[in-house]
Amino acid sequence: MRALIMVIVLGFTLLGCAPLKQYHPAPPYLKPYDLAPPLASCSVDDARKADFQHGFVEFDEYGNLLNPAVFEAQMSEIRSVQGSVLIVTYLHGWRHSAAPDDEDVREFKLAMRNIAAMDGCKRKVIGLYMGWRGQVFARNSPLDLITFWDRKQTAHSVGSGAVTEVLLRLDKERVRRNSNSQLQAKSDTQSRLVFIGHSFGAAVLYTALAPILVERFTQSTSFDPADELSTTGCQKNPREALKTVGDLVVLINPAFEAMRLATLQKLSMGCHYTNDQQPVLAIVTGTTDLATKRAFHIARAPRARFQKYTTDVPEGYEANSTAVGHYAPYQTHFLSSLEYSTDSAARQTFEGCEQYINPQLRMNLAKLSTTAPIGFAMFPSQQKHKDGSQKYFDLKFEKNPQLKNPPDHNPVLNVKAFAPVIDGHGGIYSCQLMTFIGGLITQTISN
């Protein structure tokens, strides 16, 4: 009888499993925007519409491309796009996939629409949604909650696969486009490439890129044995800005331990940078993200407790059992919003952000400098409340005053974000976060 019950339970479990499948196998591999309302205009008075296409790149549980031929066809379509492009990739997190009805797919399209508008129609925006099996059981199944720890291991496996190849080939396409001598003179018309990951998608992304970030960091012109060096091997007066893979890597509520950032953290904190250095890695974590703040620590603590640590370095058990965004010694900035007077529905989706995109956006974002002690910007809406009062939200961005001897223009940001900028683990669809990340992507936030 007990065996029969186990068989029945197993049967229902297997029936509830989310499949490993390719959700987007058919051409065209770059699709036009397909949500209402239409694409945002570049400004209030501009009749033009932002140009945005999106596609999907899908991987199995070991990081292999589910269909390499589809990716080759997609690269061919990307290569055929004329003019400057802004390519933004997104790796989703736990309990999500590339299914057409997945919430992250819809929000990804809305985010790309707004980024296209924030870029001011200077480039054609190509959004690439990178799917993997972050969801094991059927949606809303209580069994899915127990897969948190298993999906962490899978995320690192996926990141060790063909994800690196895909990202590097996109970077090569960016370099090819920018080799055009006519574009080199104008940085605001050069093609750009941005990588974004959320939760375990951030773990996938960082696993794929960490060795390359370290390699390009140390191979940059800032590391020159012929010049006067600091104790870390960095130039004291670098001649050029640091360049890594792509233009920017953004990790939102990343679900991996701070110890994995240790090497890059030391490199970034021990170096000097030019005045035009832009961020190359931005980690943004919500203070109310209990999944990475508590559940992650509970899962990591037993193994981390039994590992050995040297006394010669500050990292130890805490860094190995704490998610990177919650590890206080690595936090460089705080991001908060004091006032947000739109309705609750607009706070939960990027759909309401278009009303804040206006000709003053770049001016407002310019106040949020990563080098100033405190930056503050207000974003009025194009709409008003029923009582006639102005709808708006604001952003306050400040350097961590407890961080010892931070270098100017540090390209590695680890931002602690307070609600409602990020609300919980999956509550990343606020206009504040959209605007902040959009500002980093379009380089309207100064460094």
Image: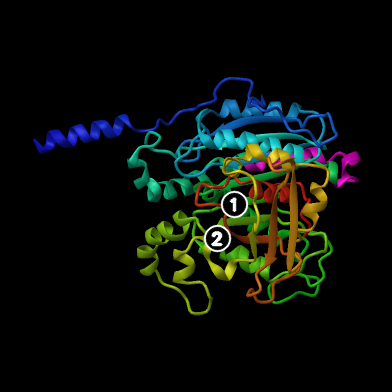
Q: Is residue 379 left or right of residue 156?
A: right
Query: Where, by quadrant of the figure, is residue 344 drawn?
Result: top right
Circle 1 — which element? strand
Question: Which residue sits furthest bottom?
Answer: 311
Range covered by the magenta-colored residues: 167-187
Q: Give the image location of residue 130, x and y in percent.
A: 57, 37
- What amino acid is found at the position of numbered circle 1 in the picture? Leu
Picture residue at 56% right of the left edge, 34% below the top = 105
The residue carrying mark 2 is: 325
Label 1, label 2: how far apart the Cα atoms are? 9 Å
The residue carrying mark 1 is: 251
Main SS class of the magenta portion in the image = helix
- What amino acid is found at the position of numbered circle 2 in the picture? Gly
Q: Residues within 10 Å of mark 1 (few under 14, many from 20)?
A: many
Picture residue at 70% right of the left edge, 26% below the top = 77
Query: Where, by quadrant of the figure, is residue 354 drawn?
Result: top right
User: Is residue 245 in sight in this rendering?
Assistant: no
Picture residue at 83% right of the left edge, 52% below the top = 363
Answer whether labels 1 and 2 touch (C-beta < 8 Å). yes
Q: Is residue 320 above or below residue 404?
A: above
Q: Give the image location of residue 423, x and y in percent.
A: 53, 52
Q: Which numbered circle lies on residue 363?
A: none
Q: Give the image location of residue 333, x and y in percent.
A: 65, 64
Quadrant in which the N terminus appears: top left
